Structures are given as structure tokens and as C-alpha cells.
Image (cartoon, rainbow, N blue to C red):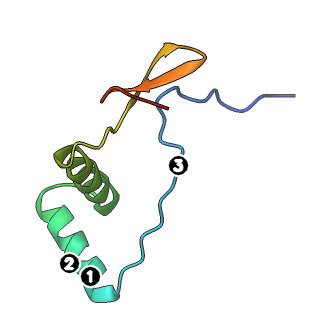
């Protein structure tokens, strides 16, 4: 029996659902097309920029397999 494809280590696996009214979505879609992005890429970049602007860590660095350290020196 054939196995499925290997999971990529940095693949985006989590989904966030955002609901827009038709007019809101059309505005987001038009702006994304204007700058050459897809609406999902635009939203992802906007959220990440907002988090970074507010000093919220956006990535996790593994130093010790039993302990995760977030870049902003917060331990989870």
C-alpha cells in the first residue's frame, strides 16, 4: 500500500476562518490584485505585520526538545 506524501516541516497547516461581507471581501480582493497578491497572502502578511508591530512573537525556536523558547525570550 502506498503512503501519502511526507509533510513539509514548515508547511502551513493551521487554518483561520475570516468572514467578510461581499463589499468587504471585494475591497480586500481588489487591493490584493492591485499589489499582485492573493487575498489569503495579503491577509496573512497583514496579520503578521500587525503582530510584529506590537512586539508579539511570531515564530518559535526549539533550543531544547523538552522546552520551547519564543524569540522574544518568553518561555512556553
Residue 60: x and y, percent? 42, 29
- Name the residue at 81% across, 28% down: 2
Q: Label 3, label 1: how many angstroms apart (C-alpha)?
A: 23 Å
Quick one: label 2 or label 3, which is nearer the N terminus? 3
From what the image shows, is residue 40 above or below residue 13? below
- Name the residue at 28% across, 55% down: 47
Q: Report if the CB atoms under discs 2 and 1 are less than 8 Å apart.
A: yes
Q: Label 2, label 1: how many angstroms apart (C-alpha)?
A: 5 Å
Q: 10 Å neighbourhood of mark 1: few (<14), some, or many (≥20)?
A: few
Residue under pointer 1: 24
Residue under pointer 2: 27
Residue 50: x and y, percent? 22, 53
From what the image shows, is residue 68 above or below residue 56? above
Image disc number at residue 57 = none
Label 1 element class: helix
Q: Nearer the observer, disc 2 or disc 3?
A: 3
- Name the residue at 31% across, 53% down: 44
Q: Nearer the viewer, residue 27 or 66?
A: 66
- Name the residue at 26% across, 82% down: 24
Q: Label 2, label 3: how many angstroms apart (C-alpha)?
A: 25 Å
Q: Report if the CB atoms under discs 3 and 1 are less than 8 Å apart.
A: no
Q: Residue furthest left?
A: 34
Image quarter (top left, top right, bottom left or bottom right) of the N terminus = top right
Quick one: label 3 or label 1, which is nearer the N terminus? 3
Left/right of residue 39 with respect to residue 27 in the rendered view: right
From what the image shows, is residue 65 above or below residue 26? above
Residue 52: x and y, percent? 22, 43
Residue under pointer 3: 14
Left/right of residue 13 with respect to residue 30 in the rendered view: right
Amino acid at each position: 500500500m502506498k503512503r501519502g506524501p511526507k509533510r513539509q516541516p514548515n508547511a502551513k497547516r493551521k487554518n483561520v476562518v475570516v468572514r467578510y461581507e461581499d463589499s468587504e471581501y471585494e475591497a480586500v480582493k481588489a487591493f490584493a490584485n492591485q499589489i499582485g497578491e492573493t487575498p489569503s497572502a495579503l491577509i496573512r502578511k497583514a496579520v503578521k505585520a500587525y503582530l510584529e508591530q506590537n512586539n508579539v512573537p511570531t515564530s518559535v525556536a526549539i533550543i531544547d526538545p523538552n522546552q520551547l523558547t519564543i524569540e522574544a525570550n518568553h518561555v512556553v
